[in-house]
Amino acid sequence: MNKLFIRSLTEQIPIEIIYMAEHHNPTKRKIIIKKMNLDTVVAYCFLRKQFRTFRIECILAAYPLIDLQHRSLSQ
């Protein structure tokens, strides 16, 4: 996950995460990481349309977003 976070931070590309929110409700978020440290990432959250702080320990999974237009052109 760390390499994906660094890529989002340096290239400012969106990624998708599964995040364990309050009350143990998992949510899917599309984010672009703006800052990160050992425990948290600060990212723009497209769901909430604002900057949010996410605890790394609560990020259950992270995925690169697939650009479907680019993918269909290369096939």
Image (spheres, rainbow, N blue to C red):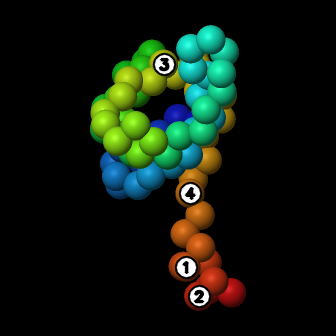
> Quadrant location of the N terminus?
top right
* Coordinates of residue 3 in the picture (x, y in percent): 52, 42
| Secondary structure found at label 3 | strand
Q: Residues within 10 Å of mark 4 (few under 14, many from 20)?
A: few
* Coordinates of residue 41 in the picture (x, y in percent): 40, 27
**Of the image marks 2 and 3, the number of the one nearer the N terminus:** 3
Which residue matches tag 1?
69
Q: Residue at x 61, y 32 (%)?
A: 27
In the drawing, what numbered circle is on residue 55?
Answer: 3
Q: Residues within 10 Å of mark 1 (few under 14, many from 20)?
A: few
Q: CA distance from mark 1 to mark 4?
A: 12 Å
Asked whether residue 1 is in view, the answer is yes
Residue farthest top in this picture: 23
Q: CA distance from mark 1 to mark 3?
A: 32 Å
Q: Amino acid at mark 1?
A: Gln
* Coordinates of residue 42 in the picture (x, y in percent): 35, 29
* Coordinates of residue 17 in the picture (x, y in percent): 57, 39
Q: Amino acid at mark 3?
A: Arg
Identify whether 40 is placed above or below 35: above
Taking the image as shown, residue 1 lies to the left or right of residue 54, namely: right
Q: Amino acid at mark 2?
A: Leu
Which residue matches tag 2?
73
**Of the image marks 4 and 3, the number of the one nearer the N terminus:** 3
Which residue matches tag 4?
65
**Of the image marks 4 and 2, the number of the one nearer the N terminus:** 4
The label nearer to you, 1 versus 2, is 1
Asked whether residue 36 is in view, the answer is no
Q: Residue at x 52, y 22 (%)?
A: 56
Residues at discs 1 and 2 in contact (Cβ within 8 Å)? yes
Q: CA distance from mark 1 to mark 2?
A: 6 Å
